[in-house]
């Protein structure tokens, strides 16, 4: 079945308020869409006999994300969360390892499937093979007709050109004619620029805004008095997270970071006899512009990031300069990661910073290989930089 017909049938079914069942490989009804193989559209007629239409959830549809068709499973999962909040939907997508539909596309898709919108800008029309053949045959027939009428068409074209240029006033006016542009052409300009990353940024800000508004509500659902004065109320922030590499080649590791950042004394991790097996250490730091000490969680992997909110708490990422370090991160490219988190690249003096690291949005911090008295100045520079990042995130 053509991809466009699948969503058309699904839309008609949903507009009529009819039900959908999910079946696994054994044709048993399941609730989890990740365990389902097929979707069955059920319809009861006047004789209460159910008419079944079955679709495979793995088949691609004509709904596009980043110009790529997504499977029916993603579309149906998005519609099933039509009444869910943004945070609940994103959390469920991450839990089930399903592609999440962005905020704008989600509203567009749900509105179209529900029948509230007649069109969707993210649906690509697909033509059946029979329709293509018929279209080709029609074009061939039209070309034959045009070839028979070619002399007459040529005469009429030449006549129209002569008519337009024979009038000197009209010819002068045509010289000053300029092509009108619609708003899309004016805004986009001559280069094709993908602003898809802004949609994800907007989603994260909306999620954070919703979380903040929910914290301002009391248990009975009414807004507290403090919520009316956001500048005066104290915002409770969870412990921020510093994410460092787990690679043995890194000059900053779980083994030496606490002594380096709190005591301003760098020790090569390979010279530390006691090996720390823990993946987490805590640091507490008092800043000049923040009224109370901040406790940081320093981790060298993301296995403990079981909720999306953990990524919201990451304030700094140390990198070794290898892009594979970010494979399991929520933002798995340096360009996206360092737009959301403050990046740091530590290296020894005399070492050359790789060209690709120079293009990343990271703070480069140079350590002296031998003179340890310089560690105090380097650590102070790091904390001042991180303090500004915390202030930008609302710590006071």
Image (cartoon, rainbow, N blue to C red):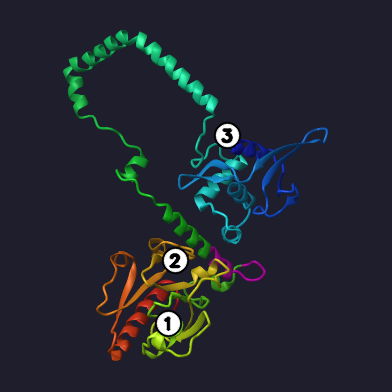
The mark found on residue 2 in the picture is: 3
Task: Name the residue tied to disc 2.
Answer: 326
Q: Residues within 10 Å of mark 1 (few under 14, many from 20)?
A: few
Q: CA distance from mark 1 to mark 2?
A: 31 Å
Q: Secondary structure at mark 1?
A: loop
Residue 184 position in % (x across, y down) = 37, 41
Contact? badges 2 and 3 (CB < 8 Å): no
Residue 236 position in % (x across, y down) = 53, 77
Q: Residues within 10 Å of mark 2 (few under 14, many from 20)?
A: some
Residue stretch rendered in magenta on the structure: 210-222
Residue 266 magenta-highlighted: no
Q: Quick one: quadrant of the N terminus?
A: top right
* Front-most of residues 383 and 166: 383
* Front-most of residues 353 and 205: 353
Sequence-wise first label, 2 or 3: 3
Sequence-wise first label, 1 or 2: 1
* Front-most of residues 318 and 288: 318
Q: Is residue 282 left or right of residue 73?
A: left
Task: Name the residue tied to disc 1.
Answer: 290
Contact? badges 1 and 2 (CB < 8 Å): no
Sequence-wise first label, 3 or 1: 3
Q: Residues within 10 Å of mark 3 (few under 14, many from 20)?
A: few
Answer whether residue 177 is visible to the viewer in this image.
Answer: yes
Residue 217 magenta-highlighted: yes
């Amino acid at each position: 079945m053509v991809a466009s017909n699948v969503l058309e049938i699904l839309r008609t079914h949903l507009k009529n308020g009819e039900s959908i069942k999910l079946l696994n490989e054994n044709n048993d009804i399941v609730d989890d869409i990740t365990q389902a193989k097929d979707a069955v559209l059920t319809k009861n007629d006047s004789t209460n006999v159910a008419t079944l239409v079955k679709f495979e959830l793995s088949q691609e549809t004509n709904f596009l994300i980043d110009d790529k068709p997504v499977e029916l499973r993603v579309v149906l999962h998005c519609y099933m969360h039509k009444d869910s909040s943004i945070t609940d939907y994103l959390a469920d997508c991450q839990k089930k390892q399903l592609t999440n539909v962005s905020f704008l596309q989600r509203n567009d898709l749900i509105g179209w499937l529900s029948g509230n919108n007649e069109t969707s800008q993210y649906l690509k029309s697909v033509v059946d093979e029979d329709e293509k053949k018929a279209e080709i045959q029609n074009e061939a027939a039209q070309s034959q007709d045009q070839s028979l009428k070619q002399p007459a068409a040529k005469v009429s074209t030449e006549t129209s050109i002569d008519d337009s240029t024979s009038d000197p006033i009209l010819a002068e006016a045509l010289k000053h004619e300029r092509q009108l542009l619609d708003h899309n052409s004016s805004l986009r300009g001559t280069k094709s620029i993908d602003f898809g990353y802004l949609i994800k940024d907007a989603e994260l800000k909306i999620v954070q805004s919703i979380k903040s508004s929910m914290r301002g509500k009391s248990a009975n659902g009414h807004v507290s008095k403090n919520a009316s004065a956001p500048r005066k109320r104290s915002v409770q922030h969870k412990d921020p997270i510093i994410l460092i590499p787990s690679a043995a080649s890194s000059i900053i590791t779980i083994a030496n970071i606490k002594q380096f950042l709190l005591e301003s004394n760098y020790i090569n991790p390979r010279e530390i006899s006691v090996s720390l097996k823990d993946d987490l250490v805590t640091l507490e730091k008092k800043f000049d512009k923040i009224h109370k000490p901040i406790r940081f969680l320093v981790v060298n992997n993301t296995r403990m990031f079981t909720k999306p909110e953990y990524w919201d708490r990451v304030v700094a990422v140390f990198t070794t300069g290898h892009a594979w370090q970010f494979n399991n991160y929520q933002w798995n490219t340096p360009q996206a990661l360092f737009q959301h988190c403050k990046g740091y690249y530590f290296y020894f003096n005399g070492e050359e910073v790789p060209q690709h690291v120079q293009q990343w949005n990271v703070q480069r911090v140079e350590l002296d290989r031998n003179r340890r008295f310089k560690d105090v100045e380097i650590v102070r520079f790091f904390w001042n930089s991180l303090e500004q990042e915390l202030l930008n995130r609302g710590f006071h």
